[in-house]
C-alpha cells in the first residue's frame, strides 16, 4: 500500500498516516511517499502512482484548508476515512532564542501561533514553507533560523525545542482525510470499516446553479425533515464568478442507508450539481472544549 502525504519526513500528515494505520490495524506492508504540496497528493492519486492520499482538511483554530477543498471539487477521488491529529507546535532551532532572526513554518503553522509570534517575536522575519517539517529541515542550516514544527521534527532533524506548545489555543486539532482514486479497484477502506465501530459520515459537494430565495433552505430542510445530523456545512467560491459558491456538507450516515438515499434523491433534483465524496467511519475524538 503506497501512501502519499505532505513531506518531508516528520510532517503532521505523516503522523496522521501512522495514526490511521494504527487505528485500522493496517500497519504492515505500506510505503510512505512524501509530496511537496497538497496538490501533488491529489495528482499522485489521479495518475495512479499511489494508492492512498492523506491531506489536512480543517483545523480547530484556523478552520478549513482551502486548497484541499478546491482539489476535492476538481478531483475524481473517494474519501474512505478520516483521522484527527492533536497538534502541538514547538519552536525549534539549532541556536538560542536570542539568536533567532527568521522563523519558518507552513502558513497554517504561522497562523495558529499568530498571538505567540506577536508577543515574543514581533520584529522577526516570518517565512512560509511547504510544510512544518520542511521548515524544520531548513532550520538546520543556520543558527539564526527557527521553525514552528512538531516534537517529532525536532528529533528527526536534530533541533532543540526552545519553547514547546506555542499555538494560540491549548486545544489544537487537525482533521485529515484518507482518500483513494475513485477508479481504484482495491478496497482500501475495508480495514477502516471492519476495524472501527464508529458511526459513518458522508461528505458531498453541492452547487445550486442559480441563486434564488430559499434555495439553500430547501436543501437543508431535506436533512432536517429526515432527522439527518449535519456535522459541517461550508461555502467556497466556485471560481466561476464573484458571489458564486459551492457548498461542502458533512453529515452522519451512510449512502447505503435508505433514509440517506431518499434524501439525496430529493436533493439532486434541486441542485445543479451533487458530488458525493464518500461515506466512511466517523472519527470520534475525545476533545476537551476549553
Image: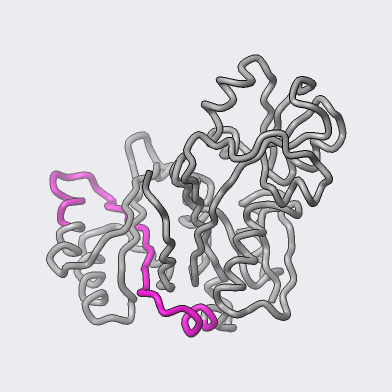
User: Is residue 38 inside the magenta stretch?
Assistant: no
Residue at (64, 39) in percent of width and height: 164
In the rendered view, does 149 fall on the left or right side of 158?
left
Task: Find residue 274 and report its image quarter.
Answer: bottom left
Question: Residue 44 vs residue 81: left or right?
Answer: right
Q: Position of residue 275 (x, y in %)?
A: 38, 64
In the image, 155 versus 6, the foreground residue is 155
Q: Position of residue 290 (x, y in %)?
A: 38, 43
Q: Is residue 16 above or below residue 246?
A: below
Colour mapping used in the image: one colour
The stretch of residues the image draws in magenta is 190-218
Residue located at (74% from left, 25% from top) = 97
Instruction: Answer with the quarter of the image where residue 219 lies.
Output: bottom left
Residue 195 colored in magenta in the image: yes
At 84% from the left edge and 45% from the top edge, which residue is drawn?
A: 158
Can residue 103 be seen from the camera position used here? yes
Amino acid at each position: 500500500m503506497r501512501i502519499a502525504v505532505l513531506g518531508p519526513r516528520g510532517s503532521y500528515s505523516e503522523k496522521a498516516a501512522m495514526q490511521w494505520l494504527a487505528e485500522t490495524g493496517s500497519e504492515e506492508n505500506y510505503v510512505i511517499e512524501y509530496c511537496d504540496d497538497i496538490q501533488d497528493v491529489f495528482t499522485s492519486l489521479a495518475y495512479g502512482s499511489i494508492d492512498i492520499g492523506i491531506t489536512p482538511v480543517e483545523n480547530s483554530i484556523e478552520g478549513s484548508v482551502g486548497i484541499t477543498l478546491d482539489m476535492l471539487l476538481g478531483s475524481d477521488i473517494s474519501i474512505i476515512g478520516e483521522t484527527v491529529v492533536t497538534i502541538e507546535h514547538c519552536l525549534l532551532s539549532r541556536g538560542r532564542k536570542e539568536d533567532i532572526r527568521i522563523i519558518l513554518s507552513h502558513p497554517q503553522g504561522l497562523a495558529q501561533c499568530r498571538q505567540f509570534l506577536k508577543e515574543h517575536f514581533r520584529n522577526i522575519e516570518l517565512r512560509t514553507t511547504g510544510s512544518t517539517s520542511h521548515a524544520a529541515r531548513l532550520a538546520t542550516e543556520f543558527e539564526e533560523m527557527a521553525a514552528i514544527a512538531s516534537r517529532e521534527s525536532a528529533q528527526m532533524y536534530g533541533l532543540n525545542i526552545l519553547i514547546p506548545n506555542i499555538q494560540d489555543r491549548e486545544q489544537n486539532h487537525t482533521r485529515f482525510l484518507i482518500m483513494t482514486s475513485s477508479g481504484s479497484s482495491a478496497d482500501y477502506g475495508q480495514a477502516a470499516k471492519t476495524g472501527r465501530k464508529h458511526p459513518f459520515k458522508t461528505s458531498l459537494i453541492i452547487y445550486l446553479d442559480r441563486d434564488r430565495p430559499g434555495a439553500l433552505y430547501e436543501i437543508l430542510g431535506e436533512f432536517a425533515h429526515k432527522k439527518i445530523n449535519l456535522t459541517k456545512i461550508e461555502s467556497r467560491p466556485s471560481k466561476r464568478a464573484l458571489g458564486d459558491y459551492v457548498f461542502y456538507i458533512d453529515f452522519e450516515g451512510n449512502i447505503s442507508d435508505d433514509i440517506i438515499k431518499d434524501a439525496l434523491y430529493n436533493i439532486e433534483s434541486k441542485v445543479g450539481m451533487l458530488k458525493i465524496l464518500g461515506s466512511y467511519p466517523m472519527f470520534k475524538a475525545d476533545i476537551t472544549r476549553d
